[in-house]
Amino acid sequence: MGRRTFIIDCDTGTDDAIAIIAALYSKDMEVVALTSVNGNVAHQYTSKNNLNLVEYLKADQVLVAKGAEIPLYPRGNYYGTTHGQTGLGTITLPEAKIRTFCEDNAIEMIRKEAKKQKGNLELLVIGPMTNIAMAISLYPEIISEIKHIWFMGGAVRGGNVTTTAEFNIWVDPVAAKIVINSGIPMTMVGLDVTERAILNRDDEQRVRKAGTKASILVADILEYMFSRHSEGGEDAMMHDALALAAAIYPECLTCIDYYVDVECEGVYTAGHTMVDVRGKLGKKPNVSVAVDLDINKFKEWLIGCIESSV
Ligand code: RIB
Ligand code: CA
């Protein structure tokens, strides 16, 4: 079987960047495009981070398209400090001088690639789902042409924005509801497993020792995450890289098929992924949900991907 083709839809912040780098150097997949969405930081930064990243790493085959600047149901300014002002913490990549954004926006990029790949296009969705929801709403014919959606988002239990909602879903619950109810085969990698996917200083030293441009960039991002954590912020959680692992190294996860839907309303519940773990609704499962993680396998795989960067 040839290499699988992916579009990565991302709100490129720190953990998105690590997932993108691992994907770029994975032998199992071809990243045809990065499509940006607002999320961790404003879209002006998430889009530029993608362009600067592909130029910095000379990923000349990877197209870069701009996507939605606000969610379907605008939430005002919710940008926190987790990823710093620009999304990559204290790291400043050289401004892209050669690469430019595609004329096609993210929605057109997804539509065209879905048709071009004739049912083989897979989507790694690691930010709010606004672009995906818009693409399948404008062009419902692509629903049957998207092979699988692998998304970081939601949780069986709890949340990291509210007591019940995870960030990617909370930012745009309407979009998430549209996508999760689309019928496209999908896998949900939520906080239940991603909050356990933590890298430490030994991992950072091993990555830095590889000494490549990509591995040093990952080590610098990890360094920022450690300093963030030392000041009371989030630890070096590989939320988005774990969603990538679900797609290309599923051996490190245990997944169970459940019926999932999204609650868009409620002070305490907007953005909640309802996972019917007891089958109480009697509805056909629509999502494969990651429920357990082998952290050692995941770390070995992720660090191996980054060490293999040239
Ligand atoms: O809740 C974690 C998710 O929100 C990750 O995708 C992180 O990058 C942010 O987008
Ligand atoms: Ca993300």
Image (cartoon, rainbow, N blue to C red):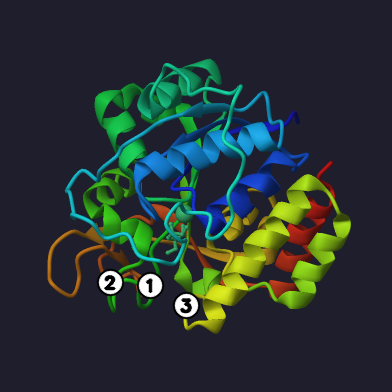
- What is the number of the mark on residue 277? 1
Residue 271, above or below 88: below
Label 3's element? loop
Q: CA distance from mark 1 to mark 2?
A: 8 Å
The quarter of the rendered structure image containing the N terminus is top right
- What is the number of the mark on residue 233? 3
Residue on which disc 2 sits: 280
Label 2's element? loop
Q: Bin the neighbour count of mark 1 within 10 Å (Cα to Cα): few under 14, some 14-19, many 20 and up.
A: some
Three-letter amino acid code of the residue under disc 1: Val
52 or 238, nearer to the observer = 52
The quarter of the rendered structure image containing the C terminus is top right
Three-letter amino acid code of the residue under disc 2: Lys
Closer to us: mark 2 or mark 3? 3
Residue 300 rendering spot, x and y as whole percentages: 79, 65
Q: Is residue 287 left or right of residue 176?
A: right
93 or 101, nearer to the observer = 93
Label 1's element? loop
Closer to us: mark 3 or mark 1? 3
Q: Name the residue at 35% across, 65% down.
A: 80
Q: Name the residue at 18% across, 55% down.
A: 75
Three-letter amino acid code of the residue under disc 3: Gly
Asked if one can make out residue 236 in the rendered structure from this viewpoint, the answer is no
